């Protein structure tokens, strides 16, 4: 394993804490996304577009506008790449993949007759692999790459000083249009004793180099479930706390139940339906005090992750000076992503309830059209899929049944079990199902939920169909390779077609075939 070097010189304390250990991999990361010796350029007289925030939404906005010939400036105070690259999608999926490998090694003998595996594994190597891969991927979001694309990169705190100007590092950037893409940060509820240093968030959990023997997670949403399951598979004794009676309350209850059962099977101690009262620390041990059915209980852990949700980054940007309205939930935008200042647009986590990387990307593309070319694209036209990367995964696109009914649709739902899909059975991954919600009397797809080991990869076909109005009958007419787990989608189409074969139609066919026998 690569030995860590001394703490990062030239980085402020806040940023240095996010790149521990400062080994060769994190040095490479910083060299790309926050070069210590970076010199901000001289501003142009006036920019077509100034983007504040260098996460996914900001990078897509800047690259897209520059590619169309606009003069673009991009401001980022911490690390280009934002949450996805540095503290979210990239590191978490590297961890999840490693945890699945550990799980397969431990269970392979029983499930598949594979060579028996035992031992604690090397958690330090898992984390080093993650840092190495993250550093390699970071070149795509690097300051140099975006400079080469024609974007003026300014590293520092940006603040509006008027309706058409932003100041950063003592320099004034005048603009024709601006896009706010400052994202969100971990939300930590006001739990007594939850002081900085007593807990981890998604921004700091990936700095761990040693596996905690006892690992606590507050929050039963996607992040909490993904990390809890992964650390349990690495060998931690994991306790997960949540106020809701079950994990993943947004999902269909039977879908969430499959994940809940998987977490328990992997060793996660679920403490749902509890109220966390306080956190105390003694001799490095964190004690979570909580209430369950009126009884006060406590659990000791060595590390504690808080994964309750996200808070929009709206502070310290001078939004008032720009006449941009905002609330604690984020910047207020209309359906075309315009703020109350018509020169200024907002995209991504700071302005959307859908806090996903792919949503930030899609919203940025809408903002470019509307900001620079008088476009009229609407955010409400987007059909947004998402996936929770537990094992098995839960992926969803479109409307849930309850949402569809609220919107006035009569809904017909089809549910296909993975246990009826040959490849899923052969892979030993037959726990799960596909549920498709149709507009009653037609094959129009209103929404779909897929619970499967590779649900996120399989959902694309249904996302395309839902977005482009391709009916389930048309999917049934497409030849799918056999055997694949994606065959469950074709099976749904076949099931719908068989449902159209009413007794009357069947009788007509029987008569026809007798006549022409």
Image (spheres, grey):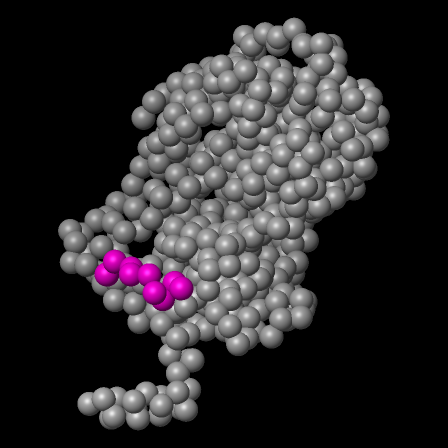
Dominant secondary-structure state across the stretch colored magenta? loop
Q: Give me the residue at 54% from left, 15% from top.
A: 150
Q: Residue at left 62%, top 38%?
A: 366
- The answer to whether residue 18 shows anywhere in this view is no
- Residue 157, given in percent of the width and then of the height, sits at 69, 20
Image position of 257 (left or right of 337)? left
Give the quadrant of the N terminus: top left
The answer to which of 510 and 419 lies nearer the viewer is: 510
Residue at the spot x=38%, y=63% of the render? 475
Query: Can you tell which quarter of the image residue 361 is in?
Result: top right
Quarter containing the C terminus? bottom left
Q: Which residue is nearer to you in this view: 368 or 167?
A: 368
| 413 falls in the magenta region | no
Q: Does residue 395 lie above or below 172 as drawn?
A: below
Q: Is residue 157 above or below residue 36?
A: below
Q: Position of residue 116 (x, y in %)?
A: 18, 52
């Amino acid at each position: 394993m690569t030995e860590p070097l001394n703490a990062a010189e030239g980085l402020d304390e806040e940023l240095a804490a996010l790149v521990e250990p400062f080994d060769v991999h994190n040095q490479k990361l910083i060299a790309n996304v926050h070069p210590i010796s970076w010199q901000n350029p001289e501003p142009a007289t006036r920019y077509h577009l100034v983007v504040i925030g260098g996460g996914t939404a900001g990078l897509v906005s800047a690259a897209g506008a520059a590619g169309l010939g606009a003069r673009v400036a991009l401001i980022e105070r911490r690390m280009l790449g934002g949450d996805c690259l540095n503290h979210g999608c990239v590191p978490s999926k590297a961890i999840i993949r490693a945890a699945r490998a550990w799980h397969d090694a431990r269970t392979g003998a029983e499930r598949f007759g594979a060579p028996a595996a035992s031992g604690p594994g090397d958690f330090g190597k898992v984390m080093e692999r993650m840092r190495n891969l993250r550093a390699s991927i970071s070149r795509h979001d690097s300051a140099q790459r975006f400079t080469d694309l024609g974007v003026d990169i300014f590293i520092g705190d940006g603040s509006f000083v008027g309706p058409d100007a932003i100041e950063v590092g003592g320099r004034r950037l005048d603009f024709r249009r601006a896009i706010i893409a400052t994202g969100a940060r971990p939300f930590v509820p006001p739990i007594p004793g939850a002081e900085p240093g007593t807990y981890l968030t998604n921004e700091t959990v990936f700095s761990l180099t040693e596996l905690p023997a006892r690992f606590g997670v507050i929050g039963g949403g996607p992040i909490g479930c993904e990390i809890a399951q992964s650390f349990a598979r690495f060998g931690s004794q994991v306790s997960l706390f949540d106020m809701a009676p079950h994990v993943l309350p947004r999902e269909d209850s039977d879908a969430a139940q499959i994940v809940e059962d998987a977490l328990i099977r992997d060793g996660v101690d679920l403490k749902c339906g509890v109220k966390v009262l306080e956190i105390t620390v003694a001799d490095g041990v964190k004690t979570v005090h909580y209430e369950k059915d009126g009884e006060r209980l406590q659990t000791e852990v060595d590390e504690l992750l808080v994964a309750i949700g996200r808070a929009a980054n709206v502070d310290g940007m001078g939004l008032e000076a720009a006449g941009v309205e905002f609330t604690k939930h984020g910047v207020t935008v209309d359906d075309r992503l315009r703020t109350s200042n018509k020169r200024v647009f907002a995209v991504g986590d700071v302005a959307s309830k859908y806090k996903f990387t792919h949503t930030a990307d899609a919203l940025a593309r809408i903002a470019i059209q509307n900001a620079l070319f008088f476009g009229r694209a609407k955010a409400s036209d987007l059909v947004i899929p998402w996936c929770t990367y537990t094992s098995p995964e839960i992926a969803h696109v479109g409307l849930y049944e309850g949402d569809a009914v609220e919107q006035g649709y009569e809904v017909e739902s089809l549910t296909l079990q993975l246990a009826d899909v040959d490849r899923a059975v052969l892979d030993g991954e037959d726990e799960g199902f596909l549920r498709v919600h149709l507009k009653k009397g037609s094959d129009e797809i209103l929404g779909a939920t897929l619970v499967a080991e590779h649900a996120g990869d399989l959902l694309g076909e249904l996302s395309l169909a839902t977005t482009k109005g391709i009916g389930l009958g048309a999917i049934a007419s497409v030849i799918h390779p056999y055997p694949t787990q994606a065959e469950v989608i074709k099976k749904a189409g076949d099931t719908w077609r068989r449902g159209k074969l009413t007794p009357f139609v069947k009788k007509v066919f029987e008569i026809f075939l007798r006549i022409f026998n």
